[in-house]
Image: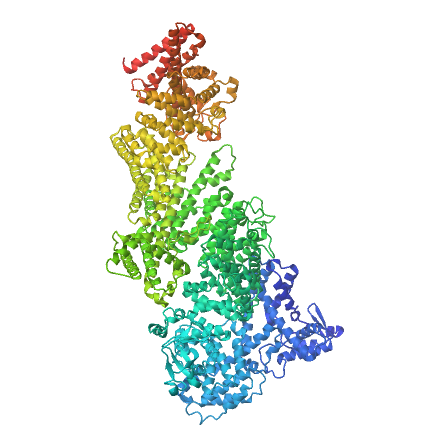
Amino acid sequence: MASGGATTSTPAAAAATGTKTVSASLWWDSFVALSDDLDRTAAAAIPDALAKRIKSHHAWLRGSVSMFGKPNEASRSALDAGEVAVGEHRLAIKPELKEAALRVSKCLRLRNLPKFNPSPLLQNLDEVQSYILVKRASEISVDADAQEFLHLVSVQYYLERQCLLKCIRRIFVHASDSSDSTDAIREEASLLISEEIERKLISIVEDSLSAASSVKADILCGSYDVGKFAASVEAKNSFHYIKAQLLLILIETLDFENLLRMVHDEVPLSGGCSAFSLGDILEMDAEISKLPEFSMVESGPLILAWAVFLCLVLSLPGTNANLEIDHTSYAQRAFEFAPFSYLLGVLCSSIFRESDGPVSGYRGILRSFISAFIASYEVSYQTEDSSLDMILSIACEVYDGEESLCMQFWDKDSFVDGPIRSILNMVEKEYPFQISQLIRFLSAVCHGIWPAQLYNYLERMNGVTTLYAIPGGVSNNVNCRHQIEIHHPIDISGVEGIAIPGGSRGHIMKVLEDGVALVRWEGVFLLLVTLAQDIHLGNYEEATDIMDLLYRMVSSNKDLCFALLHADKSLAVQTSKNLGHIEKHARIDIAKVLCNSIFKFVQDVKNADILSKTFCLLAEMLKCAPYHVFEAAFECNIFTSQSNGPSSDWLLSGALARMLFAASEENGDCSSLTISDVLRKGAVADNMISASIVFSIQYIMVNHMNWKYKKSSRWKATLRVFELVKSCLQLKPFSSRLRGIIWEILLYDSSFHSVLWRILSMSTQLLEHSYRSCYHGLKDIEDIQLVLCSGLDIIYHILSNLLELLDLLPNPPLLPMVLSSPQKPFSFITALISLMSIRNPIEDPLLFHKDIQIAATRVFSILCFTAYKAQPQLENASFTGDVLEIERLRASISCILDEEEETNVCLVVAVFNLLTSAARYQPALLISLTEQSKKPTDRSNSVSNAESNAGFVDKILGYIVRSTELMNRSPCVLLSILDLLKALWEGGVQFLCILQKLRGSTTFWGNLSRCIRATLDSCPIDSVDTVNEEISLRYFCQGKIFEVMAHELFLRGKLLLETCNPKLDHSTEQKESNASCRSSVVLKWFDSAIFKDLMDHLSNNAYKKEILHRAKIAACLCTIDLIRKLSTGDSGSLSFSVMKNIQMISKKLSQHQAFLALLSQYSQCGYSGEQELTSLVINDLYYHIHGELEGRRITSGPFLELLNFLVELKFFEHKPLEQLQTIYPVASESLLFDVPHIRDQLGVELWNHSDWKTSKEVAERMLEIMHKANVMKCYADAKLSTLRSFSTFLCVYIGLSSSNNMDLNDGGISVKTTQLAVRCACKSLESTIDSLLPQVDTNEVLFPLLSGQAELLLTLARMLFHQSKENKEAAHIYSDIVLLMKTSSASTSFLVDLMSSSHALKQPVKALLVLLLSSYEFIYNTNDSKGESDDVNTFGELSLVSTSLLPVLCKLAENRECSDVAVASMDLILKGFMSSNAWVPILQKHFRLQAILHKCQNGDLLSTQVILNFLLTLGRTKDGAKILQSANIFAFLKIILSQLSLDGSCLRNSFSAQTKDVNLWGLGLAIVASLNYCLDDDISRNNVANSTINFLSGQVPLMSAYLCAQSVTTHQSKKRALLQKSQTSSSALNLTENILTLLCILAKSHFPRDTGMNDVDTELREIIIHLLAFISKGSVKMGDSSNWTSSFFCPAIAKEEVELNEKPPIIRSKHGWFKFAASSTSSAAGVPVSSSAALPLVIRDKGPGDSGSIRQTRFTEMLAVKIYRIAFLIMKFLCSQAKEAVKRAEELEFLDLAHFPELPMPDILHGLQDQVVLIVTEVFEVNGTTTLNPETQRVCHLLLVVLETSLYMELCVSQSCGIRPVLGRLEDFSKGIKAMLQVHREAFQF
């Protein structure tokens, strides 16, 4: 820092060179230029040259303005040399500039003018520095005279000081923006802070303030003309503002308020109450008298204040004797400067109105001064004197808008306002000759709670003046000021239909000739008459003043609004009506007067002001009485065509727009946009005002930017326009036409988009600049921020509602604007990132940068989803193109998340919602945000992605560590975090780098687990009274945790599956990361205790129907009360829509049969008159409903019917619009009642101000009960959501536990825990079912809960079944299964009766049916479920359950959604749980088989296969077969099978696309076969046989083709068999079996011989023989198995087959097809199979030395049995063919070999015989003396029958064909038979 300019050169050197050297610190480059460069340059783009300049000026930046040194001898003597060296700079000293520099240094010290008194306000300037200033100024101005040049240098000096301070500020502003600032800026700022720059600046400020106190009087009086330093308009205005402030300070010093009190209380000056003594006054007067003649206007008010002060002091007791000062001379001198004009100018100046501080202070000072002036001097009403007008104008400006001053004015005890009140009385006396002044003053004092006092004043004072003919008898006795009262109405000339009512009082103003007097009539009613008269006569100036007064009254006090709207109900008017002087219907309607005047005003643009006032007044009245005002508007045809006048197009033609423009320009504000309130209230009123909507959104929005405003009103106007657009966006129009108009403008109007983007981009730039500098004022910043928030809200609202229209509408132009189209000066996404990055450097609480960040973040979130939805149409939408923008966004998000969330919870939630939206819909954006985009080149490339996103994950983990705290303090923050986690897990592998760190955290899962426990501990189970929004959020958090865990389990299983797959190559690192997953910690706390707590909390019914029922009853009570109120003709504050609805309900109610019955009943009791009867019924209905609400039930009858009718109307209930988007659910969607909307529509807050006060209690009680119902619904919905999430988690857990690759810690959830959960869930479901009655009107609220409980119960049942299968123990869970089935059956039976009334019940009923089916399947497939006594009891209970359930299932079988599950359950019941004699009567009574068959063939049922399976079960019993026959089953099957698509390819391939059709065909054939079998011994067998032949006549070709396909499959060449094995299935074997069964039936009926199909017969026999030959190959010995390659491959495909394939064998034979069937199910031999078939297979490695071992299962044995059954059927068919041939030969007496049927060769039969002998022998040997189980006995019996038939067939072949026995065959066969018989004898001890 330079403290002087001492030279450093030696005298010798100076003499030699003529150069003197001074300190280099005296030099500075222009800070004006440096400041401009810093302002123009962004922090992130500081050029190197500018950074170097900043660094070179560090000393000056550190020293600030103190671097401008004081004068000193060294610097002055340095100017004597020819050159001065200032560091590296050289100054050539010119004599003329030297003299000017010395003068500048001296003048700056003496303040530049001779009149300046020395003051330390500014330090003196060093001579060398003065020379530098002079030299630079001379380069700018050359021709200026000495005085001007001196002034220029002084201005330049102060500019340098100011810009130096600005440079310091700009450096710190740049440095504070961490996302943008460069290293050079940050280094300089850090260095300045380390050098304590703030202490230096504070010291400078303190010195300046201490020096400023001595110059106030000099500034005010003009001797200290600082204003000459002002170089701009802003600076001059600031100096004027300072002068006015100093003047007010001096006036305040005189303490007029205290002086008036002393005068009022007659306190002498010596009483001690005054701050001034007599000596002080004399001393001040002496000082003031010494002042020179003033030439400044500010001196006038100061001298006048002194004169008033002296006058009041002289009026105090005992003062005149001691004080002789002529105050009148001061007053006369003061008026020469027009003091009142100056004061009025100060009050009206914008610089005072827009000042940051409060304005009430200086207005109070002027109020006291004016009051003191009026008390001091006489003020009279004189035309030639304008003082009174000026005083009134000042008083109006003082009181206008100041509520506290207005309250004091109307307070009679306020002595300060007493003199001003006398002025009011003076002006009142001039009424009605002068009305404008009175009205303007009354408007000014109409604020706060005192307008009621003003109303009373007007009621007493104001009126209308008319000519009145005095009755002759009294005309001679009346004089001026006499009061008269009229008894008849008097018409008012010029105003048709309005008269002064009888009973009005008036004052005679003047008596004219012929007994006529000019009379003024009193009352506010007459003030309205005056207004109507002024409008009619075109006196718009006076009418405007009256409107302004009325507007202020009604906007401040709603009581007055109602009083004005019902002015005809005043006491005088009512008295006149009662006397008959005015007709009952006569009234003056101020709303109608104003509406009628609108068309008159729009004729001339000069009427813009009064038009604006009209709309403002209508808007205020609209708040109080919407229906009343709109009814008047519609009657006046404002929105519709008007005869002989403008049409409704005047709104669109621009007439109204021009008027609004003019009003805005004239008033300098946007008050004319009050029309938005009119449109917002009226848009729901009628579709006729759609033109108004178009005008509001399109015309005003697009054109308001071209209006002329005062500086402070531009952004306010834009804000009002945005509010107008938002009000139109929030409308709920009745018609699609109005909705279409709005959306067409919003989505397709390019002008609308252009203006919207222009406003947003401009405000964004201005806001960024204002945060970087102080260019804009505080109010501008506030308005800009509010505009930005409102504009972003508009875009958010449009985009959130656009999502449901994207699939219906063409791509709107709005989307390219916000997504992909490059906008100028920047893109919309760039603007959002900039707004999110905003940082307020001064952290002023009045600034709303946090709100802007929230709004921008919300828009960014929904923009991600919008881009995702519009991606097919918008290919250029991208969020990751600009790396710098991504960096800014990342820095902003990081900064927000680093802050404490308590500072702004909403912002933190918005940021997490943005990340969630990016994770779901823009994953590339999230990945870009979490990765480091800028990586130094010297960093190792081995840095993993997990390290790059560590910061992002650490922030999440930081929040999770505090999860329990957040759960209690800010659950909304925790919910947003958990939603982000869910989105990350939903993304799966694409976010694997992030998930690895989260999943591997040691505390992550533990903290989530503690959150679940904390929720259970802090949330009540069933107490609705103690719940709130936070408790609901905690349950939502719990649900999110379950969803995250479910996704984690799924992801874990998927990763383990990939790890176990040998074909996939996984690194060791990934395996280790998977192994380190600690997600199983969550399963550890699933013990019985916490699981039970979860079930108690989640499955418990939190939907309290009684609360909802009371809310509905309260709504009905309020509705009836509204009907009662409206019957009086008073619409109150009801909105237009509510009014219309109430009228509609009233009409429907009066037409109801119960209502008409009550009318008839009351008329019989002696009541008469329709109106009276209706009123009586309505009143009685009201009290009946009131009793119901209090708990006294209404007995059945007409009143109960009417109550039920009102409840069914669902008036006041929330009906949300269905929207497609689910990412941004609306909070009110789950509400039962929209309480704020109902309160607004009813206008309840205003009922205290009208005659509706008595009804407010009813409405408030209704709203309170509705609020409780909403809280209950929100709480219950949260629990239900968590319940469903928990069910999802359990479902994933079941799937995970069934995987052999997943090893769960601690064994997972135990069976005991599951049993407890099942019992708890059953109990909860039963409780919910029981709560459905009574109060059926509220049942719909329970339907979602029923669905959730049923799904949970189904999930628990599946888990229980799975655990039982794993443990291979089922007996211990039978009691739970019985409980499950009893609960499900009872619930289903109850809900079925309610399904017709509610579609929502189908989902819970379907879940219960699935539960029943699963239970039946589990028991049916359990082998160890029979035999024990407990099991017998269990099955007895199940039979009873099935018996009661079967009728319900019969009913559900006809339901499309439930038919498949219901019929499948019936199928199982018939198979294993009821005998035919039990279920046949039930089916005959309840099962409409014919109707079901008709629906099935028409496609009205979902699953035809399930129906056919059930029919097959029916057909397997004789009674069931009869039922099918009676239902004409053959015709049904013929139709069904004709609809199938069957061809040769699908018959050859069991896994073709038509497999389903093949299966249906096979089921149809099986049904026919079962019918023939069951009815074989019935009298109807011939009919069945004929029907069968008729049916099969068209099926034989298909049957032949199918068997042919199977035959070709089994007889492939050996070479082809080696390459590829044929694949078949168990269902194909069943179909083959069914076909053979039918062929046997046909053969028995001599088909196809009798039908002429001999060729088909021959072909069938050949195919069958081929099949038999294939089966006989199973005779290959064990030792020769390697020489036989089977082409047969039949894997386990169906779920049941896979389960059987896991069970051990029963027969345990290793011969024949029992061996080859086991080998045919394995794909280990390289057989190519489909992926779907190979998935269920479990590949088991063969042990060493056991390469030839095979794995036999229950499934392989089932295949072998099927094959042998096919062999049996083949043999049966061939035997019947041979028998028929032998019989024919006997008839012909010779053997016709040409027509003899084809029979198998003996070797084929030998193979089959050998298989049977080996298998039966082995079975007996294995079992020994043990009794064979029934299944094995049946198989042995089947095999022996096959053996028997084969022997008969061999005999037939040998004898008919003459084939000799094979050599040695008899011995071998005999040996085998003997061995078999021997084993059999040993087994049975023969």
Lateral position of residue 581 relative to residue 71, left or right? left
Instruction: Please tell me whether residue 999 is drawn above or below residue 1634 in the rendered image.
Output: below
User: Measuring 53% from the left and 50% from the top, which residue is drawn there?
Assistant: 929
Residue nearer the viewer, 1715 or 595: 595
Q: Quadrant of residue 756?
A: bottom right
Q: Is residue 892 visible?
A: yes
Instruction: Please tell me whether residue 1465 is drawn above or below residue 1549 in the rendered image.
Output: below
Residue nearer the viewer, 562 or 395: 562
| Numbered marks: total | 0
Residue 1778 locus on image (x, y percent): 39, 11
Residue 769 locus on image (x, y percent): 57, 63
Q: Quadrant of residue 22?
A: bottom right
Residue at the extreme left? 1165
Q: Is residue 1710 visible?
A: no
Residue 15 locus on image (x, y percent): 75, 75
Instruction: Please tell me whether residue 1624 is drawn above or below residue 1102 in the rendered image.
Output: above
Tell me which colouring the rendered structure shows.
rainbow
Lateral position of residue 996 relative to residue 1417, left or right? right
Residue at the extreme bottom? 321
Residue nearer the viewer, 315 or 1482: 1482
Q: Quadrant of the C terminus?
A: top left
Residue nearer the viewer, 1343 or 1310: 1343
Q: Quadrant of the N terminus?
A: bottom right
